[in-house]
Image (cartoon, rainbow, N blue to C red):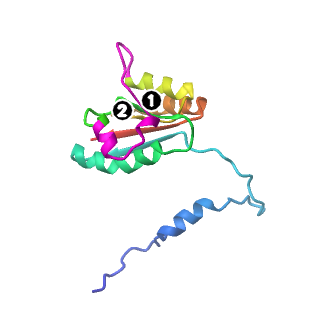
Amino acid sequence: MQFPHTLDHTQLPLFDAFLAATVSPLLADGTELPWQDETEAFSELSLRGAAGHCLNLLAPILRELSENHDARWLTLIAPPSSLTQTWLREAGLNRERILLLHPRGPQSALELAQQALKLGRSHTVVSWLHPLERPARQQLEQAARQGKAQSLNISLG
């Protein structure tokens, strides 16, 4: 069975997208730009669906982060109630490298995430903030840069 190709734009093959990310950009005169080791300090992942399915999709990401060779912690800020110590164990996460933190009293999850990022004791701080407005994103990014860490927000719908 053949499908007609009605779209006029070309599609970038999957592997070309990965290879393009490794090529150094060139200036107009053809000289190569100096390598910048500046990574994004903030990322966001949006998952929709049943809580169990979302956690199953999230497990490999958290497992990889928990096995990070960085000596610092993977910190989880105010995770959903379904993310328990039992789930962490069953998902194969390295629980010796994970801190689970919940805000206390008047402190918000956003404030706790910012504080954890600024301290620099964590390589990655994962938060579950929804909705996350632009100013809050900027605050998390700034805190992550200050602590030389990564901020990952997971939005569960």
Give coordinates of residue 121: x percent, y percent. 55, 29
Name which quarter of the figure residue 24 lies in.
bottom right
Q: Quadrant of the C terminus?
A: top left
Q: Nearer the viewer, residue 67 or 44?
A: 67
Q: Which residue is mark 2?
A: 129
Q: Amino acid at mark 1?
A: Ala
Seen in the image, is 33 located left or right of residue 151?
A: right
Name which quarter of the figure residue 100 lies in.
top left
Viewer-nearest of discs 1 and 2:
2
Give the residue at the far top of this rendering: 105
At a point 35% along the width and 45% down the height, the residue shown is 46
Query: Residue 1: which numbered mark, if any?
Result: none
Residue 88 part of the magenta-drawn span: yes
At a point 36% along the width and 79% down the height, the residue shown is 5
Q: Is residue 41 above or below residue 6?
A: above
Q: Quadrant of the N terminus?
A: bottom left
Count every numbered label the image shows and give the total. 2
Give coordinates of residue 90: x percent, y percent. 30, 45
The 10 Å Cα crowd at callout 2, few under 14, some 14 to 19, many 20 or more, is many
- Discs 1, 2 touching: Cβ within 8 Å: yes
At a point 38% along the width and 33% down the height, the residue shown is 132
Give coordinates of residue 67: x percent, y percent. 48, 45
Q: Amino acid at mark 2?
A: Leu
The magenta segment: 86-108
Q: Which residue is mark 1?
A: 136
Residue 60 part of the magenta-drawn span: no
Distance between the alpha carbons at the discs numbered 1 and 2? 10 Å
SS at circle 1: helix
Mark 1 or 2 closer to N-term? 2
